[in-house]
Image: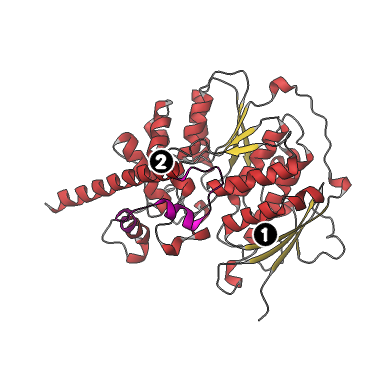
Amino acid sequence: MTETRAQFVWLSRPGTDAPAGAVGMPLADTVYWERPSRRPDRRQLFAPAPDWADDLQRVARAVFAADRCANRADFFDHWTRRIDLSVPVTDPGRWNRALPALTALLGTVTGDRWEVRFRPMDEQSLRREPFTFSAEQYAREVALFSGGLDSLGWAAQRATVRSPRALLLVTFEERNFEAVQDHVYEAVYGLRERPLRRLDQSQTVRAPKGSGIKPDRSTRSRGLLYAATAVHAAAAERVPVVHLPENGQLALNPPLSAARAGACSTRSVHPWTLYQLNRVIAEVAGADDAVRVENPFAALTKGEVCAAARDSGVPQEVLEATLSCGASPVHQPNGPDIAHCGLCYPCLVRRSGLLHAFGEDRTPYAAAPWDPALPADRTDHWRALRRWLDVDCTVLDLVADAPLPPDARPARLLEVVERGREELRAMVGWVDGVAARKAS
């Protein structure tokens, strides 16, 4: 049986032809639905990025576009795909040395088999623009800002640090919920004790016209797109570290059951993912220019992050206005008035975190998984969670699903998971208590 392969060629510039001998569907920046001001060559940075950072951003955009355009339904198991991708870079030799780490990274986050080939970048496509900003005007810190609880907590902490240098927040808009993201950002802006800048980006990919492709619903590689864009901004303004804030509980994201192993559980900020990404950056940038990606909340649970945000001056109602749902906002059946399904695992962790910090959670949810009127197929996360909380979680459970980097301290990571499980147990106890009172 012939193996199904999705083959793509990323173009140096929209409108150019694919290189001679290249095999695959041409893709370019035009597949991203974004305003002209958000194109890669028009971003509001205060200095040009080095070539390696331009390459990293290009590779990430190509990967995400290929990820969206390779529909899992077209493959034999409707999940595992074989994706071949050709991308132009300024130094193919460096990128070929980084290929083992990149392949491991892509396999971890998407669960697919990737074959990436690098070709020389067209010299006419290299961007060279004058900049008039001085180094004193560059950002001092760069972090992702999704509009979620964790990114809000980190942004609030860093915005309240007195400094003449800016905090640069990189945001990828969530269609249907841009107003929510803006509201959360305004809350951070109101707390600021330093300059605050925001870089807005698009993550909406549309298949090329006439291709007949139905974009895949999963977006497992979007974490790489986010991180690479933040690294690109940091490299441009000489910031040595990029922060991707995610509580350690969900960064590790141990599966609730064997059926949720591998890429069925999000791995975008998993320690192994960040380790492989940092390996890629080190190979293509060199030791002197590399930007390191770190998770500042790796040792905190969701509840501890909520408490830290509260202590930084973020009101409870702003924390409750954040986005945490694991269901794509584009596919939410409830419209922009209700951003959270209430049934997925991220929604359950969110509930437990807010309960831990405030003793209540007033977030509007579309449904409650403990509602006896719900059909069984809508309460599977809740039932899996309760079963998982009734069994021990060991270090072996942490490494059975995804590797840990060589410098990881498994016992410390397990402590975070256990504290998170206690928060979840407290939420389950709260739910059971409410049910018992209603029944009495």
Residue pushed farthest left? 440
Q: Residues within 10 Å of mark 1 (few under 14, many from 20)?
A: many
Q: Is residue 398 magenta?
A: yes
Give the extent of the magenta segment: 386-410
- Look at discs 1 and 2 and give the one toward the viewer: 2
Q: Quadrant of residue 20?
A: bottom right
Q: Which residue is mark 2?
A: 302
Q: Amino acid at mark 1?
A: Ala
Q: Which residue is mark 1?
A: 66
Q: Amino acid at mark 2?
A: Lys
Which type of secondary structure does the marked residue at label 1 adopt?
helix
Residue 191: percent from the left, percent from the top? 49, 24
In-image side of 179 versus 139 (left or right): left
Which is more toward the observer, 58 or 378? 58
Say which element carries label 2: helix
What residue is at 28 percent from the left and 44 percent from the top?
426
Query: Residues at badges 1 and 2 in contact (C-beta under 8 Å)?
Result: no
Give residue 90's position: percent from left, percent from top: 82, 46
Residue visible at 75% across and 54% down in the picture: 28
